[in-house]
Image (cartoon, helix red, strand yellow):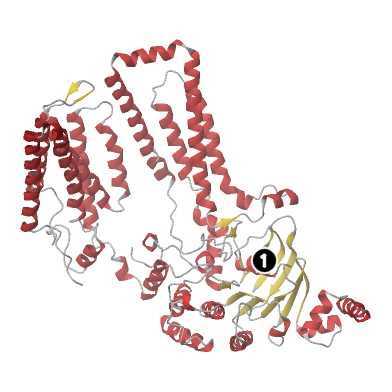
Amino acid sequence: MIELKNIWHHYGIRPTLRDINLTVSPGELLCVMGPNGMGKSTLLGVIAGILAPIKGTVRINGLTRRQSIEEEKKIREQVVYLPDTPWLPDSNTGREFILGVGRLYGVDEDRLFDHAQKLLDLFDLSDKGDRTISSYSTGQRKKIGLCSGLITDAPIMILDEPFSGGLDSSGLLALQQVLKHLAERDDVTVVMAVPVPELVEGLADRIAIIQNGQILACDSTTGLRQTTGTDGTLGEVLEQLLHPDGPKNLASYFETVDQK
Amino acid sequence: MNKPRKARPSSKTILTWMIALATIILGIYLLYLWLPSYKIYGYRTLIGLPFIIAFSCAIARVVAYHPYASKKYRDWLAYTPWTYGKPLPLGTFHISVGDLTGVAILAGIAAFGFWLSGDTYAIQSEPIHLWEVAAAVGLLWLITYLVSLFFMMGDDKKMTAGILALVPLTVYPHFNIWIGLSVVGVIYLLILAGIRRTLGGFPWNRGDWTESPQQRQLKEVLKSGIIGWPYRQIGPVPFKKKTPSLVAILLASTIPAWWLFASIHSIELYMQWSMGESYDQLLEFMNQDQMRIENLLRAYRILALIATVFVALQKVVIYISGTRPPISLLGRFATGRLIIPGYDKIFIMPILIIAVGWCLTDLLLAIKPMPLAVSPSIILYVLTVLFMSPYPSIEKWRYTGHLRVDGYRKSGGDTASKPRQKSNQITIELPGAGN
């Protein structure tokens, strides 16, 4: 379980996160959505432990982040954080990299090799797996980064924009299926930031919508539809929540264009 | 694993080198006889060459024969039944008759060169004797050999500290050849005892034999440098730095202070000896005018301040590398959070270093009379203690500090978070590991 209480964070003058209170239950898949620059990655960074919030506490499975050495060590064993662009060892092969990450997280050796091969197959990297990462394309780099996060078997996964970064259609589909499978499991909690609503429709248990550093709404897609009174796509629901004047502005714009 | 190549040169190589050396000596002697205008180069070569050879041979003597110096050798040796007390397969690193003969020959060559020069060299009008030149070659060899051997003691901190504490006694309270040699003798015995202890624990990597395959694999992963941002920074990487105890800090800090004290004292003695009466005249000249003393004290204060600021900055760098403050300076002012205790605690010790360094300088200057060497040594001691003080400990800081972990920024080319390629520096603590 992830619990955030009264989280405030600033990088400079403007607060990036304002009084965030959020609980993610075990086995839940939570999507953090919202416009660019509104604090999605910061929120994930705070949960992952790369940022210490100015105020508030983060608790993971009952342990408080950055409270004591022992607690922090235990948390780090349970949480994997995958940023948008992780560092990759260019002079090593993709397989070596993901095996290394797996070993870091203490994955059993017998399972590790099998899991690595299956991940490489899944993301269409079987041919590239034994070549150095320097020869990978942007999309392939993204894929091997995802493989590194998935191979850890960590019970809590924090994924920052896993769908971005040049993933091809098969990669997108594979990742969706993997996340769907993880969402169905009770022992894996996933929190991820995704800017495109269509990618997570039917995938997320709940969606947290963040704007100006505050959680505007946090509910299932059905709940969000009820709140907004919209029956459309998740994109339309989001638009209704984030930009209620959006349709009116659009109509006004078209009117101006047509008059010309 | 193949047995390492023997370090000892073959008889043919030794013979070749001896012929080459004899040719050089003969050539210089002929130069001396026939070309008087060039003979000065001949003397200098003949005097200087033995010193260079003695220095190189002393290092090679230890490095080529001690298992600690060669990974290939010690790895191979670890799989043989060799234990301390048995002869080393590639030969001993202890002083042998061959070494003494070689040093005697080199000393003889240097003395020969000195004799050719006509015995005209002197230091501060004190003539140098023939035997002193020969002894200097031997002393250089011995000191180089001892220093090389000292580095073969590995991680024996107590013995290392003991030996380092003894070194200044070679020149303090005053230089005397017999006292100096006696101290060198004691140091040699201590080094031998240290080497005995280190080799007694051979093979040193026996912890590898008892650790699980998983622990070994993890060690390899961390050594390989394959793990980068964010796994190395916030993944379950075992922490490598241990916090020293207060007693260890207090004792270890005496060594640099003691070295500084002995060095300043020796320089003072050397100046007295080399300047003779002029030294007393200089002191008298300085004491005549208060302004001169004030200028000197001002320079000393500035020097002490620069030193304390430098030490304080070093302390800050240890903590801030790979991290950033949670909020910018502008943000602190704007939000009124001028002090963030969880982050700013790393500045307490550096500020204390500057404050204490500064106050102590003035305090010690006010105490009169005080020998010249005392004040800087006390300041250095206090600064070293504060510098080594683990507040907060690096481990606590990395795990619980209110900081921003500095990730690898693609566009900015920040390499702070890239894994270290010098992987052999990584030591990790693993539960259940044998070492």
Residue B92 relative to residue A14: left or right? left
Query: Toward the viewer: A200 or B244?
Result: A200
Pick the front one: A12 or B189? A12
Query: Residue A256's quadrant in the figure?
Result: bottom right
Looking at the picture, how far across and down is residue B52, in whole percent? 19, 43
- Is residue B164 shown left or right of residue A121? left
Residue type pointed to by label 1:
Thr
Residue shown at the point (74%, 52%) measured from the top left: B335
The percent coordinates of residue B353 (x first, y second) are 52, 38
Q: Residue furthest top?
A: B288
Residue furthest to the right in view is A259
Image location of residue A213, percent across then percent down:
75, 66
Q: Mark 1 falls within which chain?
A: A
Q: Quadrant of residue A37?
A: bottom right
Instruction: Name which residue lies at 84% across and 80% down.
Output: A227
Density class for disc 1 (Cα within 10 Å; few <14, some 14-19, many ≥20) is many
Q: Is residue B381 visible?
A: yes
Q: Which residue matches tag 1?
A: A42
In the rendered view of the protein, which quadrant contains the N terminus of chain A?
bottom right
